[in-house]
Amino acid sequence: MPYTRLTLVTERSRAEAVLPSDEPMGVQMPMLMDLLGLTVGNQIPSVSLVRPDGALVDLELDLAAQSVFDGEIIRVVAEDQAPAPMQVADISNGLAEATDTHPDRWSERDRMRLVGSITAIALASAIWPWASDAASASSAWGVLVPGALAVVAESIVAAASNRHRAVVGTLGGLLACGLLLPGAWAAYVAGATIPSVILLLVCAGAHCLGQHRIGWASGTLLGLGLVGIWVALDRVAASSEIAHGAMGLICLIVLGVLPWSALTSSGISRLDDEAMAGRLTDRHRLHRSIRHAHDHLLSAVLVTAIGLGASVSALAAHTDPWAIALTLCLSLTALLRSRAFPLTAEVAALWLAALVPVLVLSTRIPEASRPWAIGAAAILITTTSLLNPAARDRIRLRRIGDRLETLATVATFPLLCGLSGLYSHLLAVLA
């Protein structure tokens, strides 16, 4: 009687078995399930045997009839986790299944988003005239109160409701934005820029806490800290150029410590220390920590990128050569530092923060040659992005990028000193 040696693998166990090649596989299943430790009492679980090419082993046929080779590795998976068959007989069912599992399938949450967006636009259009008149006639803080109260109410209701938190957060958040944004814009036009930004950050943090997303709320706290730093710089700095340059440098420093702060605040560093000490970690706890780390990193990067882009763009508007050089160094460092962040939104935010100041600088190019210069730069960036170097060349390019990032970062502080007039003062003293 011919035999076939198989290796059966599950998520938690692994076994080798020598089975008759001319007997149906179903006959051997009770013994195999007991060998793998999957049998509970007399109950045999419903499983599927998956071959390396994704095909399923038919339990009614023998191994020889299915051309199962000696030494094959067979994966034992739950019946509902078995891969789809290679050939499809029912097109209608396949179409329905593909439509239901499509990532852009219309859902209940999408309906809430659409309804909330329409209602928010209607509220904003209705409140806009009142907010503009109230901000110009009285204190700008007054137009922010209705939206702030709406956000607080939405956050409390969302935090209290467990089953419908996502729906309440989506619909209530959009409605609150419809009340808040017109007032914030009217206050900004009336000159209350800092109060508007502070209130928007506080409301965003309240919404995040209502959704139980602590990582997102930490980004709003960072935003409040950056606003406080900007207010202090604006009062202390001798000129707006120095304030904008110092703010850009501070945002750059913050970007460097964000990955470490995300790992530390989420508890992943502590879990790693426990794993190194031999203590196992619950998988759900690890997933919660990873989610918190990504939330913290994403929100913090977005807030910091906005601060970096705004400060460096304002710096690029100055004609001082030191300001232009500092703008180029800060933009280059932001572009190169984007390699350290994993998510698309983080990289895109840093690229926008770096490219907007460069576009501001491009306004100094003569009118006739400006389109050619911008077009050539766009072609160069596109061509570079299409390159796919080998792994060895990629490592070499990464090292060059690291050195260039270090040089650009180190150069920012001397350029900031030159912007403040320190070198001119020293030359005057020494002369």
Image (tube, helix red, strand yellow):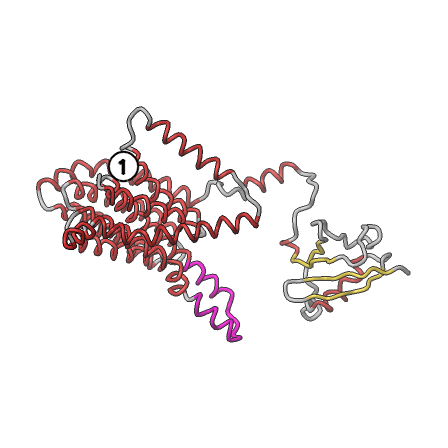
- Image coords of residue 324 (percent x, y): 27, 42
Above or below, 414 against 38 in this view is above
Q: Nearer the viewer, residue 391 or 177?
A: 391
Q: Nearer the viewer, residue 242 or 251?
A: 242
Where's the N terminus, which quadrant? Answer: bottom right
Above or below, 165 against 373 in this view is below
Taking the magenta stretch, the answer to whether it contains residue 370 is no
- Helix, strand or loop: magenta stretch: helix
The residue carrying pointer 1 sits among few (fewer than 14), some (14 to 19) or many (20 or more) residues within 10 Å by Cα, namely: some
Residue at coordinates 39% horizontally, 65% vertically from top-left?
264
Which quarter of the picture shows residue 258?
Answer: bottom left
Q: Which residues are magenta?
A: 268-293
Find the residue positioned furthest to the left. 137
In the image: residue 83, left or right of residue 306: right
Find the residue positioned furthest to the right. 1
- Image coords of residue 318 (percent x, y): 22, 40
Residue at coordinates 15% horizontally, 46% vertically from top-left?
192
Residue picked out by circle 1: 122
- Image coords of residue 56 (percent x, y): 72, 51
Taking the magenta stretch, the answer to whether it contains residue 276 is yes
- Image coords of residue 248 (percent x, y): 28, 50
Amino acid type at circle 1 is Ala
